[in-house]
Image (tube, helix red, strand yellow):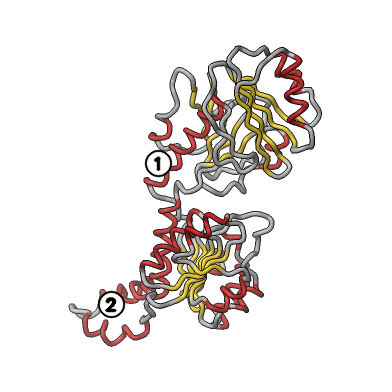
Amino acid sequence: MYIVQTYNKVADEGLKDFDKEKYSIVEETNRPDAILVHSTPLHNIPLGSELKAICRIGAGTNTIPVDKCTEKGIVVFNTPGGNANAVKELTLAAMILCMRNVLSANEWVRTLKDGESDPGRAVEAGKEVYRGPEIMGKTIGIIGVGAIGSRVARACHDLGMRVVGYDPYLGHGQLNELKHYVHFVQDINELYHAADIVSVHIPLTDANRGFVSRQAIDAMKDGVYLINYARGPVIDNDAVCDAIDSGKIRGFATDFPTARELGYPQALCTPHLGAGTPEADENCSVMAARQVCDYLENGNITHSVNFPDVAFARAEGDRLAIMHYNRVGMLGRITEVVAAAGLNIENLVNKARGDMAYTLLDFNDAISQRVADDLAALDHVIRVRLIH
């Protein structure tokens, strides 16, 4: 039986995918086969020899020690796209609320409750202070046009906006699909110079920390609106506050406010609500459960952040799942061990991702543990799983 440890509440729809005869779902254990986690930091937890997978119910994996997991052959999954619609909707709402000064206007109107019985006259006299521009006809620059950014781009296009996108990591097929409503630029400064609104949708990595820097903000239009529903540290928040002080940034919306930003009426701040919907929780939990089950039972990898995605239907017999470094001659050495054992490979798939590689071997017969041990003894092999 596989032991799956949960560090946060997992939606019931996701838990239903775990067969009770095969899985035990627990909150406390020293020997989990897999971990499901929302946002609890895992950098200081022990990574035991039984641990095979960690799945982030969401997209960002900065709370998980990915490098250490890779060294131990632990697959780190996430659930991209499962919460994309939720973040898209709140991004659009924040953009409109920010530009139209809705929250400040609402706060002011509420001060009229102790005045005359009909506040209409006072409202008409004071509303000019809160007038803001429409989004139709404006240019929005989207940094990161992946699962969330692409949805924001499509919605903004449908609302009559011009969409400029920057994402050097998109494949040719994705670019072709999006080019009908996104004008892509290779130089991000073109985006900064053109955009009335800049919306950020990139993951938090070491390379992306402070991505929207003081220099980047200086390159933006005067009176720009800046939206951050990605991660707090991808923006230089002190530079944002200074730009609000100078008038460079007219409005700022964020799901990750700093203490200083909370003091600005121009800053619309929400408490990390982007993916916080029942629908997103359910979608991500179901994705997480299915990915973990397929990996534990079949060795298939889908949506990993540290190993290549490899997934195909099983043959009739056992399967060997081999994690190894991407080195010249590795596949030959693996097949030599199998041949020396007198075995015939029914199916073989090998894929690499940077320095990491993953090989699945299928057989029509049962395989002895000795074959797995011989493979594990090869140089540059990280982990071998024999799946019956």
Q: CA distance from mark 1 to mark 2?
A: 41 Å
* Mark 1 crowdedness (10 Å alpha carbons): few <14, some 14-19, many ≥20: many
Q: Position of residue 370 (x, y in %)?
A: 72, 13
Q: Residue furthest bottom?
A: 125
Q: Earlier in the sequence, mark 1 or mark 2?
A: 2
Q: Nearer the viewer, residue 386 or 70?
A: 386
Residue carrying label 1: 282
Residue 10 in view of the camera = yes
Q: Position of residue 62 (x, y in %)?
A: 62, 48
Name the amino acid, label 1.
Answer: Glu
> Which residue shows up at 41% across the image and 53% down it?
85
Where 51 sits versus 170, above or below? above
Q: Quadrant of the C terminus?
A: top right
Q: Tag 1, which secondary structure? A: helix
Q: Return the mark for residue 112.
A: 2
Q: Is residue 233 left or right of residue 112?
A: right
Q: Nearer the viewer, residue 29 or 139?
A: 139
